[in-house]
């Protein structure tokens, strides 16, 4: 990719966890010969590590929201608050919800994942998907305004579902966690699952080893029981955004954008991606914030290299990743590969790590 006389237009689509390091890189070192744009839906990014803590009432919203406007300004990037609704990879332009079309020379995508909610439509206003996170936060806040003692069902037994169920119980609701047996803390060892079950039992959360489908009266479980509820939080894992399907980019069988280890699209050299929207062609990477964050500096370096034609780096994830699950009662479960431990002291460690992350990306203007 050559600069020529015209500035190269570099667009970051989505102010996701994966793009924070890119914005920091641009703020620290000039990216010569470029016009930079950050197009994202909302001005603030909610740091997912602290979301369950906010839900449980331990953090105020301001404590986990990262303001992207000062980061974009420091990076010399124009901030466009809009939704990407289409991408034509060959023509190199993005279509926005406002009707605007943005052409680009280099594009990086970190718009995160989506939650499929089609099967839950019968619940109407009682349905609260965990994504988009901004809408989830508004919905949870409105729900809690009606007071405790309501019935909340969390659909999805991954680490996020467990944390959300524990947080909801902490707010004094009657909580049900619904996931098939194989979908309870998948990818974690037996000890981790036992610690999670103990925490859920202590919090009074009822676990249903079942799939769930919605009818107007509530959620139907595998044995035909109908679970009436006031709110269903759907946390069934990330799916790809619908607009990727028509982008002309190489996708994996589930519809995620396929990249190499260098985070570059396998089919379009002008497009990079990291975080939940991407799937690696060379390995299976769990969709987790920790990978989005850790891929960020490699993404930053590779966007520079793509502009100058220098070799790209690979993002090599470690074999194990540390996951810290807040249990809502002041304890935290630490997961490291097959190793797991729980304790109050781990909550202090988690709090320090989380606040440190927020501080790193908080610019005082
Ligand atoms: C409740 C919960 C708890 C979690 N806890 C953890 C945890 O403790 N540890 C961990 O490793 N992972 C955790 N995760 C997973 C983690 O949140 C994701 O893996 C991570 O956020 C992915 O980062 P990303 O950069 O891909 O996108 P995201 O961080 O999801 O950000 C996407 C950004 O793009 C914007 N956007 C979305 N769509 C569009 C669009 N069409 N146009 C423009 N902008 C758009 C959004 O507004 C947002 O700014 C959790 C997830 C949930 C739901």
Image (tube, helix red, strand yellow):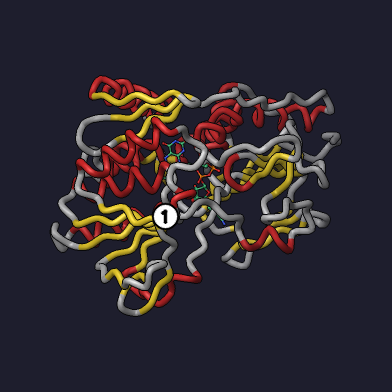
What's the residue at 35%, 70% (across, down)?
Answer: 219
Can the viewer see residue 10 in this picture?
yes
Q: Nearer the viewer, residue 332 or 140?
A: 332
| Quarter of the rendering containing residue 160 | top left
Which residue in the protein does label 1 denote?
A: 179
Q: Nearer the viewer, residue 306 or 196?
A: 196
Mark 1 residue CB less than 8 A from any atom of ligand 1: no
* Image: 36 above or below 82: above
* Image: 128 above or below 285: below
What's the residue at 81%, 57% (across, down)?
Answer: 91
Q: Nearer the viewer, residue 7 or 338?
A: 338
Left or right: 87 in relation to 354: right
**Residue 64 in the image: x percent, y percent?**
34, 38
| Outermost residue toward the front in this view | 223
Left or right: 76 in relation to 331: right
**Residue 292 in the image: x percent, y percent?**
56, 35
Q: Quadrant of the C terminus?
A: top left
Query: Is the residue marked by circle 1 packed among few (<14), some (14-19), or many (20+) residues within 10 Å?
Result: many
Q: Quadrant of the N terminus?
A: top right
Left or right: 276 in relation to 189: right
* Image: 65 above or below 147: above
What's the residue at 46%, 52% (across, down)?
Answer: 42
* Image: 311 above or below 40: above
**Residue 158 in the image: x percent, y percent?**
44, 45
**Residue 253 in the image: x percent, y percent?**
72, 54
SS type, badge 1: strand
Can the viewer see residue 135 in this picture?
no
Marker count (numbered): 1
What's the residue at 58%, 35% (across, down)?
Answer: 76
């Amino acid at each position: 990719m050559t600069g020529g006389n015209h500035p190269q237009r570099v667009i970051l689509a989505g102010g996701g966890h994966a793009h924070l390091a890119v914005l920091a890189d641009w703020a620290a070192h000039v990216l010569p010969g470029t016009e930079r744009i950050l197009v994202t839906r909302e001005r603030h990014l909610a740091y997912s590590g602290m979301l369950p803590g906010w839900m449980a009432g331990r953090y105020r919203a301001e404590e986990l929201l990262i303001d992207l406007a000062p980061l974009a300004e420091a990076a010399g990037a124009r901030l466009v608050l809009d939704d990407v609704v289409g991408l034509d990879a060959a023509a190199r332009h993005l279509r926005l919800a406002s009707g605007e079309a943005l052409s680009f020379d280099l594009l990086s995508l970190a718009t995160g994942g989506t939650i499929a909610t089609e099967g839950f439509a019968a619940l109407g206003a009682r349905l609260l998907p965990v994504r988009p996170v901004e809408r989830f936060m508004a919905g949870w806040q409105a729900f809690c305004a009606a007071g405790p003692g309501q019935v909340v069902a969390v659909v999805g037994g991954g680490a996020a579902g467990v944390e959300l169920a524990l947080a909801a119980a902490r707010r004094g609701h009657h909580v049900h966690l619904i996931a098939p047996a194989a979908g309870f803390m998948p990818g974690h060892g037996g000890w981790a699952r036992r610690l999670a079950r103990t925490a859920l039992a202590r919090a009074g959360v009822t676990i249903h080893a079942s799939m769930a489908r919605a009818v107007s009266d509530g959620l139907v479980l595998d044995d035909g029981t109908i679970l009436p509820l006031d709110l269903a939080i759907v946390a069934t894992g990330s799916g790809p955004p619908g607009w990727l399907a028509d982008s002309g980019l190489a996708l994996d069988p589930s519809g995620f954008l396929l990249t190499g280890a260098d985070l570059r699209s396998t089919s379009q050299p002008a497009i990079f991606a990291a975080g939940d929207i991407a799937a690696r062609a060379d390995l299976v990477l769990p969709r987790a914030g920790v990978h989005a964050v850790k891929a960020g500096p490699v993404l930053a370096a590779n966007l520079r290299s793509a502009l100058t034609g220098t070799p790209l780096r690979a993002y090599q994830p470690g074999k194990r990743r540390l996951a810290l699950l807040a249990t809502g009662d002041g304890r935290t479960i630490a997961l490291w590969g097959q190793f797991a431990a729980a304790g109050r002291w781990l909550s202090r460690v988690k709090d320090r790590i989380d606040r440190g992350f927020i501080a790193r990306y908080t610019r005082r203007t």
